[in-house]
Image (cartoon, rainbow, N blue to C red):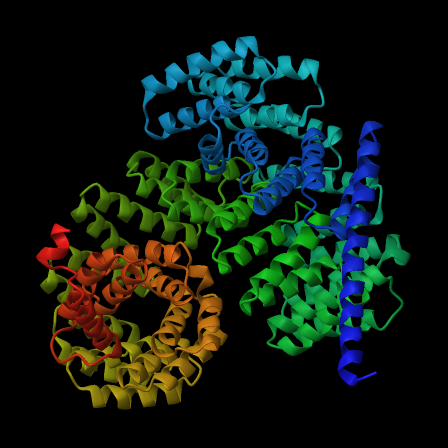
Amino acid sequence: MSLLAALRIVVLSGAVVALAACQDDSARAEDHYQSALAFLEEGDTVRADVEFRNVFQADGDHLEARQRYAQMLRETGDLEHAYRQYLRLVEQDPSLISARIALAEMALEQQNWEEVRWHGQRVLEMDPEAPGAPVIALNIDYINALEAEDEATRREIAARATTLFEDDPDNPLLRRLVIDTLLRDGDFDAAIGIVDTALANTPEARNLHDTRLQILAEFGEQEPLEAQLRTMLELFPEDDQLPGMLLRFYVARDDIAGAQTLLTDLAGSAEDAVAREEALTALVRLRLQREGPDAAIEELDRIIAADPDAAAPFRALHAVLRYEGGDIEGGIAGIETLLEGELTQIERGRFQIILAQMLLQNGNLVGAQRLVDTALEADPGQTDALKMRAAWLIEDDDPDQAIQDLRSVLDDNAEDAAALTLMAQAYARAGDHELSRDFLSLAMQASGGAPAETIRYAAVLLEDERYLIAEEVLIAALRLTPNEPELLRALGRVYLQLSDWLRAGDVERTLRALDTEPTRAMADSLRAAILVGRGQVDQALEMLEAAADDGNSGVGAQAAVVQARLATGDLDGALGYVEDLVAETPGDMDYRQLLAMTYVAVGRMAEAEEELRVVTTTEPQRQQAWIDLIRVQDALDREEDARQTLVAARAAHPEAPDLMWVEASYLERAGDIDGAIGMYEQLYEMVPNSPVVANNLASLITTYRSDETSLDRAYTIARRLRGTDVPPFADTYGWIAYRRGELGVALEHLERAAEGLPEDALVQYHLGMTYLALDRPEDALAQLSRAVELAGPGDTRPQIIAAQDEIATLQAAGVGSETTQDE
């Protein structure tokens, strides 16, 4: 037999084996699916759940199984997991209207208006008469009326809903709408009555209890709210969110005894070691927060003495507390000692990840990655290890693999808020901003409205100008965590955007009443913004000057005064104010730097340079002063001096990203494109989550390199920019899409970029070339001519030369002539 023939046999055998494996996986998945259906017929959802998971292990794209699994989860009240499965369904098949309807309905039940509108609009575009679609449309109209503050329309829609509800009292979406309008009209008793009537028929209906909880949180007294939370905890002990919600309820009201009793009861009634450990760990953390490290250590010692055989997790926590208290070496050594002893596989994996996190925080990335790899070799499903690896994959521009890891985590626990947040980051890096927003919403819900997850989601809503939805999200979180400063600050921003000065003032007073240095600063900033927004600039200035004069606010307050004076056109007043500060304390480099920037604002560049030279000579650690000095010298057309300053700055701060950015810009201006790309590559490695760095690197690569490898690299970096409204980002992604032959995507982005950057010749050139590729010669001629006109005579950039050549070709073909127009 010839070698070639032998190779063919080997290849063919491999193909047959692969095909057989695929067939085996498909058959195995179908067997598990049929088994799951049989268990459902018997009402055994627990074993059905196991069989569904087996289906997806064999075939993750089994559409029918995922549909039925999502339906089962929704029917059993596991809405978070159900929502996740329906999202997977629309990922697999965006045209699946039943999944879209389910998503819209569940979003309505959870009062997530952003998701209601998004999924509901998709339903109405597909089939406005589909079962459930008219009620979804009614709810969307109601939401729109609320946002428009159209009271007449709201009441008209509410009347229609009430009539429909009388004929269909079990419809949860109609019930929600009717209850909402009753609450808005101040009829609290009628709203609670509707819920209690429904609960009388279905006393364990989770969605009804959630509704009752929301009503009490907004309008009820504290005792009924506590009673409702405890009732729900008894009815739904498997819900991991409820203990945290009740705990935050107690802590927010400073009822530490109630919180400790709750955690002690949870530990005593725990059915497994994991639940007991979680409750006791929370108790230790509570004592740490309220009473300090000694009390936490005392609690740990008591727990360890009570059950030495189950003490390993608490010894690990002991090491973590030492680490967090500043004993870095002692904390690490404590975990390392534990890893040398006898442990279960689960404990070993957990402690390896704790140690990995410690090493990572102390700059030992290699050691951390080695521990994560070791943990995953022993247990490929170790969730904390998968989450750490996913975070690294996202930073390494491999969001697709990160998504696969995170799906494994979420298949195990659909309410893992950290995994859901990472999934949002992965989809953002992949350029799918809609799914990224969906997962941020899920993370917020899974956390029970915890502050960090709520603020992340609210930030996205603010970017999308969904102010009323952001308001509802933040208020809901504040009901369970009242007086949380960051939530209040975010809510204040919402009211500023809405020009709702009255409510913004309420937030400001709440922040001020907390009476801490950070909250006073937040309150001052918010009060100044309110006054400026109302046009009361003089009062704002008076307030800022009073805050600056109290001696406790630092240079930030003085800078705010200067900015306010400059904004009102009082240039002399701004300059005189800072000159007085410098005269009083000439050795204060904060004031000297502020004076320099005030000189810049009033156009006195020579004085600004002099001050910045003093600052950089006296305190060379001030990176921003170096950058400001370089910019001033550039403005004075002293490029060589600016370059020498950059050399000195880089010597003082060799790894400062901002200075590396400046150097990259100089390299690009000097025509050293490879050097600029190299510098941006270093920057990108240091700050991979910066969209600006990603944009500039991808833009340089696609502008100056034409090979396929470079294009693929640029696409990988720029995926996160897909769908952006930022004109420079849209130009970068649009040109990459053009280069990849995705002309429709290119057109969408480049038209947006050309509108936003009308004076940028290269952006107009990019759009012109896209019109040309789309066989729109007249548009191409106009756009390319615009690019050449903007570039001006003598511009020898290759893109401008190419534009001139294309113009000549088009004109030679008669494009733009009277003959062509007549035809």
| Image position of 169 with respect to 350: above or below | above
Residue 691 is situated, as x and y percent measured from the top left of the image, at 41, 64
Residue 81 is situated, as x and y percent measured from the top left of the image, at 66, 40
Q: Quadrant of residue 394?
A: bottom right
**How many numbered circles does the render carry?**
0
| Image position of 816 with respect to 802: above or below | above
Residue at 14 percent of width and 56 percent of height: 820
Question: Residue 201 vs residue 177: left or right?
Answer: right
Q: Quadrant of the N terminus?
A: bottom right
Residue at 55 percent of width and 70 percent of height: 396
Question: Residue 420 vs residue 114: left or right?
Answer: right
Q: Residue furthest front?
A: 1
Question: Residue 576 vs residue 723: left or right?
Answer: left
Please name whichever residue, 786 or 513, is drawn nearer the observer in this view of the structure: 786
Residue at 38 percent of width and 85 percent of height: 674
Instruction: Tell me, yes or no, if residue 687 can be seen here.
Output: no
| Image position of 44 with respect to 688: above or below | above
Please name whichever residue, 510 or 725, is drawn nearer the observer in this view of the structure: 725
Q: Quadrant of residue 604?
A: bottom left
Please name whichever residue, 512 or 146, is drawn nearer the observer in this view of the structure: 146
Residue 384 is situated, as x and y percent measured from the top left of the image, at 70, 59
| Image position of 401 with respect to 612: above or below | above
Residue 564 is situated, as x and y percent measured from the top left of the image, at 20, 56
Please name whichever residue, 73 or 450, is drawn nearer the observer in this view of the structure: 73
Instruction: Tell me, yes or no, if residue 306 can be seen here.
Output: yes
